[in-house]
Amino acid sequence: MPIFLSLQTLIRQRLPAGSLRERLARGSFWVLIGTVISQGLQLFASIVTARILGKAGFGELAIIINTVGMFLTFAAMGLGATANKHVAEFRVPDPARAGRIIGMSSVAAFVSGLVFTVVVLIFAPALAARTINAPQLAPELRLGSLILFLSVLNGAQRGALAGFEAFKTIAWVNLASGLLKFPLMVAGVIYWGLMGAVAGQVAGSAVEWFACWLALGREAQRAKVTVSYRRMREEWPILWSFSLPAVLTGTMLAVTNWGVSALLVNQPGGFAEMGLFRAANQWRMALLFIPQMLNQAVIPIMASALGEGRARSTVRMMFATMGANLVIILLPALAISIASPWIMAQYGPGFTAGWPVLIACLVGAAVIACFSPVASILVASGRLWLYFWMNLGWAVVMVVGAWGLLSQGALGLSLAYAVSYLIQAVFLSAYASGLIGNKGPEALKLGLKPGPPGPPENQ
């Protein structure tokens, strides 16, 4: 008992209630709780799927998901990031405006998601035949369009939840949806093959949407924010000033990712190589899930602190998050690298020799995890156009690298990703170094107008 009380006292001293450190620690804890189980289940489901579909079938599933993902970025319109930043900024000083922004984001997500879903339904045969050279995949691509619609709605809802700093709720949503999605995905692929795998993804997205919808209603009520669909026109300028560069950035990234995937599947044996890359890339995505969720937790806290004029604290938080991400990812990445031949063998015959692909994906994951907090501070401070130009540079390097290395198949594509992330890290490092320079007020170095005097910068 004395040891427990001493530990509790130490935590209170190091993490004062209401401080940025305490808010970040609390958010990170709940992010970790929900993520570990949900991502573990998703990885296990992917192994089961790969063993049943085989290397080429798993590659077909990958290109279907990637194609839907490309249209998803268009349809999402940056609404998740928009809701995240602005709900965090206005939920306390102007709850009525926060409610209008949630309403506007929800309506825009519904309309945009519906339009792009119809586009994919209509053009699925042409997309399957002319871009991925697989006309037989048109029915699965049409079914996959429902993933697009549900994911757009989920993105806007999750952004608003993060804006409320409802990280415990997000953790429960991740856990519940992960537990429910797993049997749906596995049952689908066991009984109906590739079509069932896509149907399982659709059903999982529907479960996630319902859980997010319930959670958002409860968090809005708790924060005394009334979601309003009246006077939404007053908030449309946000879509142009913030959402437009976010959309352009997301669109460029999605088109680049889809484009290099299409290049790969059009090579001899391309679908088998795509299946190999997807298997390895899922481990990269699993490793990045916690850092990405941590960044999602950081953005609303940064936006809130910047609104209070606490720019120095925000910069310190950025560097602290960079260190935390590196600690989170380094040991697991090393362990997975050592076990990479065994891990890839679990996907079935033909995957074992792809262990170098997994290692290249892990290198890219480590770089992203370390430098993503710099991108978070760009989003929190509203510097979306600078964020766009940095990502345009990444896209150019990625396409050139993929074009030059595609003769190496999945390994070439994974190396192109790793190299492009390393080069982008150089530019992010330069920006991060500028934030700790000693010229002028910190707020001006962030590209912000100095805010009103805020509370003491209690970190």
Image: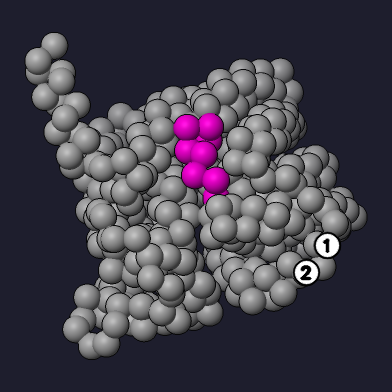
Q: Nearer the viewer, residue 343 or 244?
A: 244
Regarding residue 164, the answer to whether it shows in the image is yes
Q: Amino acid at mark 1?
A: Arg
User: Which residues, given as a range, are shown in magenta?
Assistant: 163-170
* Residue 263, picture quadrant: bottom right
Q: Secondary structure at mark 2?
A: helix
Q: Residues within 10 Å of mark 1 (few under 14, many from 20)?
A: few
Q: Nearer the viewer, residue 357 or 437?
A: 437
Residue 446: x %, y % from top left: 37, 78
Q: Residues within 10 Å of mark 2 (few under 14, many from 20)?
A: few
Residue 215: x %, y % from top left: 64, 32
Q: How is the image coloured?
A: one colour
Q: Is residue 291 left or right of residue 110?
A: left
Tell me the number on the disc at residue 239: none
**Residue drawn at x 15%, y 20% as measured from the top left:** 5
Residue 237: x %, y % from top left: 72, 74
Regarding residue 251, the answer to whether it shows in the image is no
Residues at discs 1 and 2 in contact (Cβ within 8 Å)? yes
Screen quadrant of the C terminus? bottom left
Q: Amino acid at mark 2?
A: Glu
Q: Is residue 380 above or below residue 448?
A: above
Which residue has dot 2 on it?
234
Which residue has dot 1 on it?
231
Q: Secondary structure at mark 1?
A: loop
**Residue drawn at x 66%, y 36% as measured from the top left:** 221
